[in-house]
Image (cartoon, coloured by chain):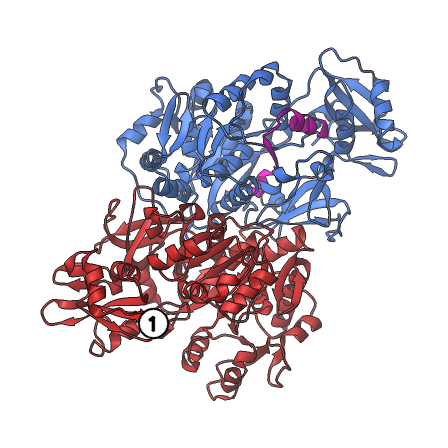
Chain colours: A red, B blue
Amino acid sequence: MSDFFNLSYIPERLALVQGDNIATIFEGRQHTWREFQNRVTRLAGGLVACGVGPQDFVAVLAENSDRFFELYFTPAWIGAVLTPLNTRWSYGENLYALQDSGAKVLCFDDSFRDIARQMKESSDHAIEIFIYMGEENCPAWARDYEQLILNHDPVTQIQTKGHDMAALMYTGGTTGTPKGVMLSHMGIWSSIISASHGMGCRDDDIYLHAAPMFHVGDYGVSMAAALAGATQVMIRRFSVVGVLDAISDQHVTMTLLVPTMVKMLLADEKTENADISNLRQLIYGASPMPEGLLVTCMERLTGVDLVQVYGQTELSPLATVLPASDHTFGNKRLRSAGRSGLCVSMRIEDADGNILPTGEVGQVVVHGPHVMLGYWNKPEVTAQTLKEGWVYTGDAGYLDRDGYLYLVDRLKDMIITGAENVYSAEVESVISLCPGVLDVAVIGIPDAEWGEAVHALVILKAGAQVTEQDIIRHCKDRIADYKCPRRVEFRPDFPLSAAGKTLKAELRKSYWPEGGRFVN
Amino acid sequence: MSDFFNLSYIPERLALVQGDNIATIFEGRQHTWREFQNRVTRLAGGLVACGVGPQDFVAVLAENSDRFFELYFTPAWIGAVLTPLNTRWSYGENLYALQDSGAKVLCFDDSFRDIARQMKESSDHAIEIFIYMGEENCPAWARDYEQLILNHDPVTQIQTKGHDMAALMYTGGTTGTPKGVMLSHMGIWSSIISASHGMGCRDDDIYLHAAPMFHVGDYGVSMAAALAGATQVMIRRFSVVGVLDAISDQHVTMTLLVPTMVKMLLADEKTENADISNLRQLIYGASPMPEGLLVTCMERLTGVDLVQVYGQTELSPLATVLPASDHTFGNKRLRSAGRSGLCVSMRIEDADGNILPTGEVGQVVVHGPHVMLGYWNKPEVTAQTLKEGWVYTGDAGYLDRDGYLYLVDRLKDMIITGAENVYSAEVESVISLCPGVLDVAVIGIPDAEWGEAVHALVILKAGAQVTEQDIIRHCKDRIADYKCPRRVEFRPDFPLSAAGKTLKAELRKSYWPEGGRFVN
């Protein structure tokens, strides 16, 4: 019986049907898809020589590069598992992930040379084989990426099954113990099919990796672009200038930015004068986009199609897409996360597991071939999140009659004040529209009378003259009294996750006693 | 571990995201996707009540209808397997398929009421449960399709895996013992993804089932259209008037026709005056399209995008797509079958299994998640066709540098005359361009001197005055001498398969001794 399936079918096919097209462009270096496939299969030979076999983990701790994109496919070719580490995590968090997975090799670049050496020299011996994928000289204690390619012949593909693990993606590090999410070949593939369909990718597209490549957001969206044959351009790390230059110099047609990046791009005066005429599509997601920012983006980036993606690592990662056609001024669906991707089924459940009708708020629950295999070595947490093929997302929301999903909050960010549920995201959305407000986070803090009180933390734009009372009045004009913040505090910045999400758990910490129910 | 996957996620999602859109239109009856999903899950309850369980076979012997389309998804919902029978096969052939599969139920319509009763009353007892899906009164010995829907509540979906069997498609009946091809949920899904991407299906498309719905060609293409949300219109069976009326009355935007149907459509004077302005895309495939017919089609159907699909049942069924953009006059790629679908890998091998370089003719070999699980109960034949995940198609062809596949012949239709290989398809293509020729089949017949001689069988257009010498001269002006037919015979018609393919094995039979190597 044959049910073989491997993610690396993607470059294998591209080498066949568009072998002379450019696959990757990074800092002046470029490779065709024929070369790309040749490099992937030779590097795979190198990994085999290092002792990497089926279902072994290949960890990567690196900034963006063409080599990182080759590593999206190389472990798969020999049945091994890509394990991208988080470039913003502490030494201890990534060490945990390496030990937890039992990774066989660690690929690292120049930015993580010191950390890799520290791991090499430590008594933990978490990793034995180090592969240096940087641009300078390979340290003596590591193997050189390019030498592995030069010194090995292409190896035969290992036949994997659709449900074999293709990637182990760590999540949750900054708010608790990291969890390794096991994603299958079929799962990732079906997720990128959904994304590719929603985005309308073409073989003449040029995709820019501006968000970190270790993150499932850039991973999923760029793979979707690659599936359709798009060229991949990388900048080492996000910067406004880097993005603008890549768009104009490399004729970038599409990219994924997280809302924080969009905000930085729009706030920078260089964007005014930059030539972004090549850009036909800006995909945004990975954290909620405040409505004010979205409207500004639509006003400023005329001629650029905006596409929203919503998902989470446990969904490989795509759940819904809000296509370009829904991005019209005044469309109420701008406040939605869009509709289920091509092969994503979804329902809304109450706390007792009853399926709720259209319009009622409950937990968003998703199934399809893209759901994770589970959390690595964590059967209890898996059992809480994945029930009979359905992933419990932890997001609260409702569906309209046409299947548009309206997210109201993370369940754990919901504030209960008196007997009322207040969705922090709704209050944030209202405050984001207040002139002078750059960013906002609304949290629940302990309150003797109401249990919790609605509390707003606000970052003002430079030079803005806005008072606590201005913001409270702005809210009272627009939403029910019990939803309005009791207090507004001004902050210079917020703690952010790698994906640019505001870490509310961090913000809540100083208000709640250790172990309080809102810390995680 | 979750790696659940089921084909019926498709209507489940459509009920969610476009529940009020029309799913099916058949003879004045229509259902929305919400109704469709409700009917599928109730009928699934009915099947469970009939004793149908996971991996049981649900056979269907029927002409086209909306109910047949519901049966594309209903068995899948409960983990059972759709087994469409061939409406053109003899009683004996379909009885063989029923006995071979051990089907649990047979769904039949008015056209097959007598055959179903014959099966019911025969001593074979191949089938115990009969479901009547026709438009008249249900016979006493059968259960009524609509009553099963009325009398049962929706049942919970059975969780299937990606590699579980979703369909058993019988093939090869007219030229040998039928073989049941086992197709998986993941396989069919990945094939329709490839088709959908190649065709560019949209949620406002309206697809016409004009080819028989039991055939894997209409099955695959219509499912691809459904995946993108297209409405499904059925005519009971192909007729020129039926197709023309459906296009104008039901605003059909896309359909699959086999070359024989295209030929009939273009030959009919009603087509001249018909309003086909709704039709935006005509997909053709399932057998080779003679170049002459293709050019005529492009000249006559201006404003209609032509898309070629090539595949076989063993590939669920898609291998390559020649998109609309390649259909330009004078483009040499018109003679190709297009390029690998989104997740199809392909290579060309010689008889010893060596991979051949660009431009060299050998056997077309394909892999990807869409390859069959194998032939049901036929491990030896499976081992000949499916090797380490690669399907040996039996087609001879070559690839160009851009991955376009040029089919030269079925391996078994290749003629060896003297020491030269002659591809019958090439000679047929040349003869098809000779004025007055309606259809042609070129076969090898025994020849004392050359081993085989090139022999042409020709059907002339009504009133055409063309002689054997005219055709031979036409060929000598265009191709090498050894490829030209030694003899030309005129025929009133050819034996055709269900897909409209000329049955060359039948044509060869009278020239070759019983058991000769070209009979099958």
Residue under circle 1? A463
Q: In which quarter of the view is residue A286 placed?
A: bottom left
Instruction: Determine whether, in the image, residue B334 is placed left or right of residue B247.
Output: right
What residue appears at the point 47 percent right and 73 percent down from the top-left corner? A85
> Which residue lies at the image location 34% right of the left edge and 43% below the top edge?
B16
Judge whether residue B298 is colored magenta.
yes
| Label 1 SS | loop
Q: Nearer the viewer, residue A467 or A48?
A: A467
Above or below for A393 versus B358: below
Identity of the residue furthest to the left in this view: A449
The residue closer to the viewer here, A377 or A307, is A307
Residue range corresponding to the magenta coloring:
B291-316
The structure residue drawn at horizontal position 73% and vertical position 36%, both measured from the top left corner, is: B412
Q: Is residue A483 above or below residue B51?
A: below
Q: Is residue B176 left or right of residue B147?
A: right
Residue B354 x %, y % = 74, 53
Q: Position of residue A411 (x, y in %)?
A: 26, 61
Residue A319 in the image, given as x and y percentages of width and height: 39, 53
* Label 1 Cα crowd, 10 Å radius (few <14 / some 14-19 / many 20+): few
Tell me the chain of label 1: A
Res. A496 image quadrant: bottom left
Callout 1, which amino acid?
Answer: Gly
Quadrant assignment for the N terminus of chain B = bottom left
Q: Quadrant of residue B146?
A: top left
For the point 70% across and 72% down, which residue is it? Answer: A150
Say left or right for B349 vs A288.
right
Camera sees residue A428: yes
Quadrant where the C terminus of chain B sits is top right
Can residue B503 be seen at all in this image of the molecule? no
